Image (cartoon, rainbow, N blue to C red):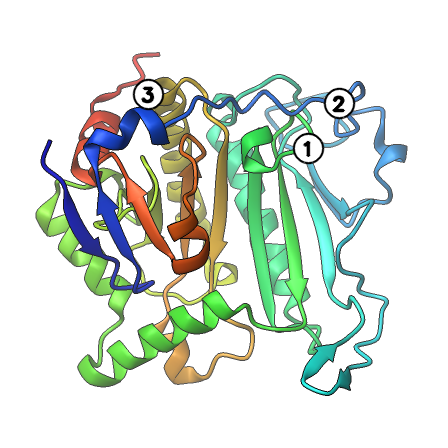
Amino acid sequence: MQGTLRRDPLNRVWVIFAPEKVRTIVTPSSENEAKFDINPFIPGLEDMTGKNILTRRNAACPGEKWTSRVFPASLPVLKVENSKNPKGDGLYDTMERIGAHEVLVETYKNNVHFDELSESEISDIVSMIRDRVADLKRDTRLKYISVSKNRGRAAGGTIDHNYLEIKAFPFVPESIKAKLANCRGYYESRERCMVCDILEQERKDESRVVIENDRFIAFCPYASRFPFEITVAPRRHSASIDSIDNDEIADLSALLKQLGFKLRSALNSPAYNAIFIQSPLSASETESEAFHWYLSIIPRISVLSAEALENEIYINPTLPEEAAGFLGSIKNDK
């Protein structure tokens, strides 16, 4: 079987494409593996999760007190009421667990797949992400806001329900610093955004594009680290998701609904991670021109090797052109 080595220009990591490894790397997973005896995210059990920060009530769901909501995590890894209180012990640094940790329950519906939600329900979710990011940005102690979804036990999910987590950190993660430096260097040498150029090249090439519409594109990255990894990015340059407008929310929601169906149909409802990547809160004007937010979706159908964990060298048995072609061929006739 023919393989290849490819380098990811954004993350600067190498990926080994080895089709012969498909039987040892790819493992089945399900988004419905993480179960509790009681699901605290359904209506009527709000007392188990605490006071709402933000709610939506979708007009298409009459009779419901809420259709999606945000509340503080019951076991937060970061706490907004803490003080930073940094300390040092020789070369070791420490501080209190200052920050924010919120849960966004995407729907009141139990036992439902994401793509079975309506486009207007998904739009509510995206608008809530935008609003929470914009609100958390006002806290000058915070440096980076992470929005992520862990669906299924293999992806780190703890409850069989559609939910997101929003975490605001008092530092910028090293991976984001590296991406920012990469993008800034590219911008300074070419006076263009790297991700904008990637999107232009992917649209021109077409072989890795899964789906696109007027404002967004979903594609399998040239050097995909994982089988069926997908990047979703706005065609308009913007550094942070809180800049998304209502027309973009509508187009992103339509695309995510179609994409969810394709992934579920192609991979038998796999566990997956979805991570919004955006600029740090302290980004300069130049860095904002250089950095472009995007959503990374990773189906958890493969195992990580020691090379990936320690050296960031990934082994992927599926070429992105093959993955994109397969996903693109799946149609929803309903």
Q: Are marks 1 and 3 in contact (CB under 8 Å)?
A: no
Task: From the viewer's perspective, tell me whether residue 60 is left or right of residue 190.
Answer: right
Q: CA distance from mark 1 to mark 3?
A: 24 Å
- Look at the picture and state if 69 lies above or below 37: below
Q: Which residue is mark 2?
A: 36
- Look at the picture and state if 268 lies above or below 147: above
Q: Nearer the viewer, residue 221 or 162?
A: 221
Type of amino acid at the residue the image marks with label 2: Phe
Residue drawn at 56 percent across, 47 percent down? 148
Q: CA distance from mark 2 to mark 3?
A: 27 Å
For residue 61, which numbered disc appears in the image? none
Quarter location, residue 11 = bottom left
**Residue 130, position as x, y percentages in the image:** 56, 55
Residue drawn at 20 percent across, 32 percent down? 19
Q: Are marks 2 and 3 in contact (CB under 8 Å)?
A: no
Task: From the viewer's perspective, tell me whether residue 81 is left or right of residue 192.
Answer: right
Quarter location, residue 178 = bottom left
Quarter location, residue 179 = bottom left
**Residue 195, position as x, y percentages in the image:** 28, 63
Type of amino acid at the residue the image marks with label 3: Ala
